[in-house]
Image (spheres, helix red, strand yellow):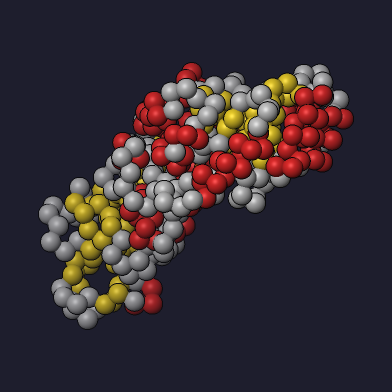
Amino acid sequence: MGRATRAIIDVSAISQNYRLAKKLAPHANAVAVIKADAYGHGAVRVALAMEHEVPAFGVACIEEALELRAGGVKKPILLLEGFFTADELLLIAEHNFWTAIHRLEQIAMLEEAPIATPVNVWLKLDSGMHRLGFDAKDYRQAYERLQASDNVADVVLMSHLACADELDKPHTMQQAAYFDQAADGITAPHSIANSPATLAWPALHRDWIRPGLMLYGASPFEEAQANADQLVAAMTLESEVIAIHDLQAGEAVGYAASYVCDKPTRVGTVAIGYGDGYSRSAGTGTPVIVNGQRTRIIGRVSMDMCAVDLTGLSEVGIGSKVELWGRQLSINEVARHCGTIPYTLFTGVTKRVPRHYI
Ligand SMILES: *Cc1c(COP(=O)(O)O)cnc(C)c1O
């Protein structure tokens, strides 16, 4: 009943992609990164399905971590952006959250916190991205302060890569060299690798990898890459044809009449638009699958609908199934047509779109 637009989430595909990450980095532990509602896939559902094989989950902030606890997730949860205010530390200790620490004020707050159980800390080095983290010159001192505090349990040395998806750039190895110099002489586990580094930079696997995007079956790379090519799409975004118009050459489709038919064209209206998170940047020519056949978007995507070219497709009609991305059509290819990355498409799927778990 009702509107057919939905995102079908195959949680076994997420587990399969997680196992690929583990296989590629056999000596590392793997935090499953499920921030931003597991990149739009539903963090609680994903976490509960993976919990038996995942030592810890990664989210951005405590609000996301508390949502997982409320949903029954028991494993440790790493706050990748750390904490913002001292009052969070009570909850961090109470719920066995692990926290990134990226500046001195956070160390002071942690030293002073009236907590009964010590907290695991991931001490962040800014190795060149200049987003979060200590400089090399302050890093050892920060580590020693943590070591001296009764409120601190284990410390992991972490950093984040800016360019690991670009395999021919020198930045990644420069960041690694900076990290190794800052960490020299500190005996603690290392964590550097996000999805692209898990897939393509084995020297950076170290002790803990932090795969995110790859778990959902999208590639972080623009080009084909042998390991990324083994990923399995976890989300299929689909809808259906709800109207069909046979237009003559010269007739226009959609807002701004921007697409004008150059020949007789069968146009299908599909019940999905940017209000569902299907990008308005998906212009004419963006691939879609209708009833198993590849065709294209024509004209402007509107809030609740978009138009597809049905000309010459066999056995399509009202109710024909439309896949916007998923098993038959890679989200990477759609993202390329939209001038964006799969991360924004995944996280942009709105709450109007019901998630169906299989
Ligand atoms: C989001 C995030 C990750 C995961 O990145 P992907 O590119 O999605 O694999 C890893 N580490 C940190 C610190 C992050 O913020």
The image quarter in which residue 81 lies:
top right
Whether residue 93 sits left or right of residue 340 in the image: it is: right
- Res 268 seen here: no
Which residue occupies the foreground of this view, 151 or 334?
A: 151
Between 113 and 268, the residue placed more toward the observer is 113
- In the rendered view, tell whether residue 91 sits above or below residue 318: above
Q: Is residue 176 above or below residue 338?
A: above
Q: Residue at x 43, y 23 (%)?
A: 26
**Quadrant in the rendering for residue 68:** top right
Number of labels in the image equals: 0
Residue 211 point in image, percent of width and height: 49, 35
Image location of residue 143, percent across then percent down? 75, 31
Residue 88 in percent (x, y) is at 77, 34
- Give the farthest residue toward the bottom: 250
Residue visible at 41% across and 48% down in the picture: 167
Q: Residue at x 38, y 77 (%)?
A: 256
Residue 112, visible in the rendered structure:
yes
Residue 346 position (above or below residue 187): below
Q: Quadrant of the C terminus?
A: top left
Residue 57 drawn at (x, y percent) = 56, 29
Quarter of the image with the N terminus is top left
Residue depicted at x 20% and y 61%? 310
Question: Would residue 41 appear left or right of 253 to someone viewing this image?
Answer: right
Pick the front one: 292 or 114 = 114
